[in-house]
Image: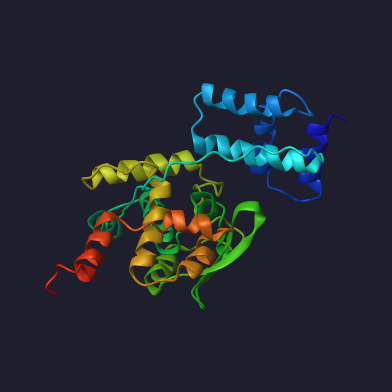
Amino acid sequence: MPLFEQFVRERRYLHNISPSTVSWYSHALKWLPAESPTQAELKDTVMRMREKGLKATGCNSAIRAINAYLKWSESPLKIPQMKEPEIVLPTFSAAQVTRLISWKPRSFYERRLHLLVLFMLDTGCRITEALTLRVRDVDLDNLLVTLDGKGRKQRIVPISLELRRALYRYIVTPPDSLLFATHRGTRVSRMTMLRAVKSLCVDLGFDPPPRTLHAIRHTFAVTYIRRGGSVFHLQKVLGHSSLEMTRRYANLMTEDLQAVHERVSLLSRG
């Protein structure tokens, strides 16, 4: 059996990785020209990624998978991570969030969309975590929800009284049903909800930010820090394996830095 296939097979059946992770490994390993690449071939691999238009973040994603394979195959070689530019991730403004929360849905699809937006704003979850959530995972009595995160890692996160009220009005299906399901009870696709959220933003009078669904998660993170939440607690809520990832989400906006500077500046008369 080829080494690539054996590596993915072990990861799948011995490490119990998710189908999406299996796909990630399989796609990344296609960049390698051989099962036992030389240092020169590894360098050429990264250069081919760049020539194909991959950004540093995309290259690093593939590099992490390739390095996992190299370690598994007991190769002494390793590809160094590329330096990624620090980019301020997009967010919704406070006024835009207010419009989203205050929107009055009418039809089944609008109620489902509104609840999804409220759910993501209140928990900071990933879109895939919301769309795979089942009614039984929602504990309305204790204001908790159990999310299935990346790497099949479950985490329990709190919800607000406001979200509980919205969930209570919406939930009418059996415990094993998907919370955000179609009329037939099947899973809603990510692209369907992305188009719906973008359309809703336009209907409410503003342009959706780039990476619209992820911008909701980032908005949650920034607001969490602004209101005094701990970055360590935020790491648990977001389901990050490392604090470094959380710090990327928790970058304060320019106006936050301006407000702090006004208080600490030696020239300020405050």
27 is higher (above) or lower (below) than 155: above
Q: Nearer the viewer, residue 90 or 113?
A: 90
Q: Position of residue 134 (x, y in %)?
A: 57, 59
Image spot of residue 7 (x, y percent): 79, 39
Residue 125 visible in image: no
Closest to the observer: 105 or 60?
Answer: 60
Its colouring scheme is rainbow
Residue 39 falls in which quadrant of the image? top right
Question: On the rendered structure, is 69 left or right of 54?
Answer: right
Q: Nearer the viewer, residue 187 or 224?
A: 224
Quarter of the rendering occupied by the N terminus: top right
| Residue furthest front as drawn | 266
Vertical position of residue 130 compared to residue 208: above or below: below
Residue at the location (36% across, 48% down)?
Answer: 88
- Tell which of 186 and 203 is nearer to you: 203
* Image quarter of residue 124: bottom left
Q: Furthest residue to the left?
A: 269
Q: Position of residue 188 (x, y in %)?
A: 51, 45
